[in-house]
Amino acid sequence: MSRFPFLLLLAHLLLAGVSTLAVTVNLDVPVGPVVARWGWDIKGNANRFSGQRDAANAYADANANLLRIPIFAPLHSANGDIDVSGSYGNMLNSINQVLAVNPNVEIFASLKLSGAATFPGWVSQPSAAWPTENGSVFGDAVQKPNPEHYSGLIASYIDWLRSEGIKIDYLGLNNETLGALTWDRYIDTVDLLPSRLDALGVPAEYRDFELVGPDAFGIPTSETFVQNLMNVGRLDTIDIAGSHFYPQYASGQETDWEDLAALSGKPLWHTEVHMPVGNAEYVGIPEQAVRDTLSVLFASNKRGVESFVWWGYNNNENSLGSLVRGNVINSTLGAYPIETTPTFTAKDDAPQQPLYQAYLNGDRVALWVANPGDALTDLEVEIDFDGIVAVPGTRSQSFSVTFWGATDTGDAAPSQIASAAIAIAADSMVIDLVPENSVGVVYFDVWRVGDANLDGLLDQNDIKNFVDGWLSEQSGPTLDSWMKGDFDRDGITSMADFVILRQAFRDQGLSLPSLSELATEVAEPGALPLVVSATLIQLLLGRRSRLTRR
């Protein structure tokens, strides 16, 4: 791709004393899968979305599409009774508020971890097939759950939700309890569950869910569990390989996701994404907690994770963590990560090192910048692709830059720091200020080759622009030359640009008239040179086509 300096760019850089490109975004190189799901977790606070405004914050303002709900095992009795007066009642209210905002939200039910009290005593009572065995949940001694009883508890939970008109889409039997619900007991629980549902008369539509497992504390632990399933030929007991992966704890490395995918052959979910701005490890440096959280999240996506769930610490949607979480959802859901340099790692980067990662959704780019250090001035961003970057004013809201103070961890909304970004060339921009200790996102639109009039469509209007601009010359690629059909950015609208335009139309399943037809159809003065050269060009095109078919 040609690179031509612009006077504005040179003047800006000379004044700023900046001489090198700091960030490069390559739109044509995806580095991870499309993010298919983003959810909020209410296991820690079942009442979190009990109000309409709270639900709208998370499922309208932040357009999440998954809700993770708790299975409170201690609220279940051996006779099938369930205490729905407190926590479950709050949970039900939150579910209904969320579904009222977005009825298409999927439900992910998962065991709530409660230390030694995670499983009620009756669930661990022995039987002939499953004698009493001691286990543990994070160092707390427990008796391992008996699959014959635990499967009954899960069935009664599903049946109760059915009676409330709620269907679950995903089920997690294990949530950091692998020391108690071991792989063999897990398999038997899965195998017994259908008969338990049959006994309760649960119809087919309420049992059409996928199993997420093992939902372990760290990825290596998840790998061990999956390996045990594979050793006995029972990978069929999980549909999705889910795991937790923490910024601040030894829970594996980002490459472990690839190992888990290879081992399981299943889609990958990060089932509990933490942003520990208030944790002891980050006291006094919340900006580093935000940066580390984003590095773990983005690195996981780049290693194959397609769906995520935010762990929720509190109800306050105005806090720094909630604000960043909501903006991450909106910028990544339905998008995929694209090559962004300088790169980063999830665990090993030096403190205060800035993080950059861009996401592409259609023609919309979101570039995240987490800066836990000193301010950055005149940050230049090069956009590497065969198109043109949006210029402010060419499309409504085509460009925006927002940074927030990453040290504002109180109840009030974090301070928003104004920062101008200038689109200064067809393929680069300068962000004049990235504030110290901040986190932000830059949105901009891009237009692909063929879209001469910058409306996001390939149609007759683009053809007219091309014809009008035929053989026009300029000193270099500019917005004006692009709108005259200079798609190869050599400063002149020529035969090479027609070939690019024709291919762009073909890629969209559209046909493009021949050059002679274009000259006839568009009666403009700029079209006259086309008539003169049409015969020769058609011959050249025909010869090229014949050579291609050989």
Image (cartoon, grey):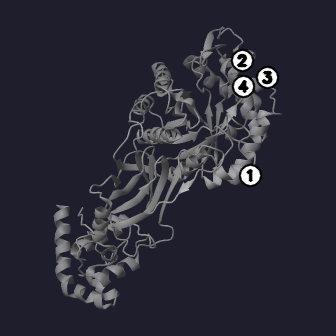
Q: Which residue is mark 2?
A: 123
Chain-order first, disc 4 or disc 1:
1
C-alpha gap between disc 1 and disc 2 = 36 Å
Label 1 secondary element: helix
Chain-order first, disc 3 or disc 1:
1
Quarter of the image with the C terminus is bottom left
- Looking at the image, residue 177 sits to the left or right of residue 481; the answer is right
Q: Report the residue at 38% width, 55% height from top.
A: 377
Chain-order first, disc 1 or disc 2:
1
Instruction: Give the vertical position of 399 relative to 211 (above or below).
Output: below
Tell me the number on the disc at residue 77. Answer: 3
Contact (Cβ within 8 Å) of mark 4 with mark 2: yes
C-alpha gap between disc 3 and disc 1 = 32 Å
Mark 3 surroundings: few (<14), some (14-19) or many (≥20) residues within 10 A: some
Q: Measured from the top left, where is residue 187 in percent x and y?
A: 58, 21
User: Viewer-proximal residue, 363 or 151?
Assistant: 363
Q: Measured from the top left, where is residue 85 in percent x and y?
A: 83, 33
Q: Nearer the viewer, mark 4 or mark 3?
A: 4
Q: Which residue is mark 1?
A: 52
C-alpha gap between disc 4 and disc 2 = 9 Å
Q: Which residue is mark 4?
A: 73
Chain-order first, disc 3 or disc 2:
3
- Looking at the image, residue 474 sits to the left or right of residue 452; the answer is left
At label 2, the amino acid type is Val
Label 3 secondary element: loop
Contact (Cβ within 8 Å) of mark 4 with mark 1: no
Chain-order first, disc 4 or disc 2:
4
At label 4, the amino acid type is Ala
Label 4 secondary element: helix
At label 3, the amino acid type is Ser
User: Viewer-proximal residue, 472 or 449?
Assistant: 472
User: Viewer-proximal residue, 444 or 318?
Assistant: 318
